[in-house]
Image (tube, rainbow, N blue to C red):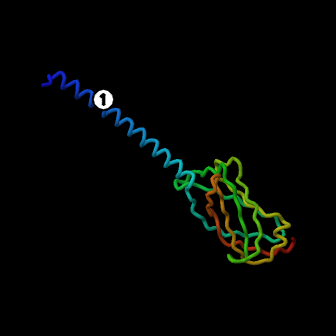
Amino acid sequence: MQSDEDKLNSTYVEIEKLKKDVSEIKDLLLKLVSGINTWWSRNTVMLSAVTNLIVYQGADFETTFFVSNDNGSSFDLTGYSGASLIKKHYESSTSTTIVVEITPPASVGAVTLSLSNAVTAAMHPGKYVYDVVLTSGVGVKSRVLEGVLTVVEGVTI
């Protein structure tokens, strides 16, 4: 039969083993949560905003918009690239490319869209559709802006 002191020592050893097991489980959980957070930040899809634009035929066009997180803070666009097309309707086979620039510093989430006066001069007045797609460094594509783009005929240019 074990003495009380032996029982206490045995219990102490078991408690130390349990502490070690709990510590290892805690470390594994922290690694799992860290991995989930990393995956989520790389694979989060942004929601699209709808904004209608007006472009004056023959004039330079430029506008800047900001991408933000759900909580309103700036979305860091480091490593992102952008693409944007204008079409007469969604199924048109022809399109006009809008220049998309992630405006430095990328951490503020600013995106600038532009068209040269030569490009706008070649466009016929009327309504078009457009969208802006950002692609993350790991290839995740998100439509962040879309709407109707109206080309207005000018008098002077």
Residue 106 rendering spot, x and y as whole percentages: 67, 49
Q: Nearer the viewer, residue 33 or 4?
A: 4
Determine which quarter of the picture holds residue 98: bottom right
Q: Nearer the viewer, residue 73 or 100?
A: 100
Q: Nearer the viewer, residue 144 or 50?
A: 144
User: With 70 as the anchor, is 106 left or right in this view?
Assistant: right
Residue at 61% x, 61% y: name it.
142
Q: Nearer the viewer, residue 94 or 59?
A: 94
Residue furthest left as drawn: 1
| On screen, residue 116 above or below 20 | below
Determine which quarter of the picture holds residue 19: top left
Amino acid at dot 1: Glu
Q: Quadrant of the N terminus?
A: top left
Residue at 61% x, 58% y: name it.
140
Q: Quadrant of the C terminus?
A: bottom right
| On screen, residue 25 above or below 83 | above
Residue 119 rendering spot, x and y as whole percentages: 83, 68
> Pointer 1: what residue?
16
Q: Secondary structure at mark 1?
A: helix
Residue at 22% x, 29% y: name it.
11
Residue 50 rendering spot, x and y as whole percentages: 62, 68
Residue 22 rendering spot, x and y as whole percentages: 34, 37
